[in-house]
Image (tube, helix red, strand yellow):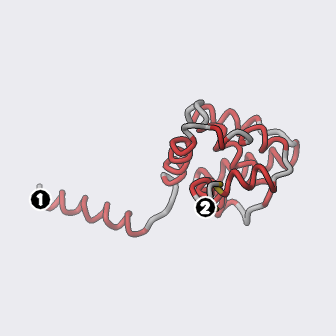
Amino acid sequence: MIINKFLQMFSEEYVNSKSIDKLIEFTKKTLPSDGTDKIFIGCVLIMFDIGFTGPASCHEYLSSIVKSGKEKIGNTNLLYFYVSRINKNKMVSKYLKNINQDLDFEKHLDLVIEYLEQFSFDFSTKIKNSYDKKIKEYDN
C-alpha cells in the first residue's frame, strides 16, 4: 500500500533527523490547507511518538488515531484529551493544540478519514465492485 510506504519514509526522516519536511511537503500536495492539513500532520506525529508495528499497519494505526477525534468522553474528544493532557511533544502541540476551538474540526477530521479510507482494503467492497462490473458487462 503506497500510503504505508510514504508514512514509513516520513517516520525514518522524523526518527533520524527530527525533521518533518517531507511530511509537510506531502501534506501540502495532498490535503487542503484549511486545518485538515494540521490534523493529518499532528496525527502522524502522534503515531510516530507512540509507535506503530511497521509499514504494513501504518495506515490502520493512523486511521485509529484520527478517528479518536470523533470519540468523546463527556464533552471532550479523545484526540484533544491526548493533545492537552498526555502529549509531551511540542511538534504535536504546534499542529493540534487548538483543535477544540476549530469550528470546522469535524469537517477536517472527515476529510482526513475519507482520504485514509481510500487506502483501506475492504474485501466485501472489492467483491461488490467486481460484481457490479460483471453485471454491467452481462447487460451489454
Residue 42 place in picture, x, y as percent: 71, 44
- Asked where in the image residue 76 lies, by quadrant, the reply is bottom right
Name the amino acid, label 1: Asp
Q: Measured from the top left, where is residue 104 in percent x and y? A: 54, 38
Q: Is mark 2 on a helix, strand or loop?
A: helix
- Looking at the rendered image, the quarter that the N terminus falls into is bottom right
x, y percentage for residue 55? Answer: 69, 60
The residue at which mark 1 appears reads as 139
Residue 28 vertical position relative to residue 110 in the rendered view, above or below: above
Q: Name which quarter of the figure residue 71 lies in.
A: bottom right
Counting from the top left corner in percent of width and height, residue 24 is at: 70, 35
Residue pointed to by mark 2: 60
Where the C terminus falls, by quadrant?
Answer: bottom left
The amino acid type of the residue labelled 2 equals Glu
Mark 2 or mark 1, earlier in chain: 2
Give the residue displayed 67% in from the left and 57% down from the top.
Answer: 78
Answer few, some or many: residues within 10 Å of disc 1's Cα (few below 14, many 20 plus, some between 14 and 19). few
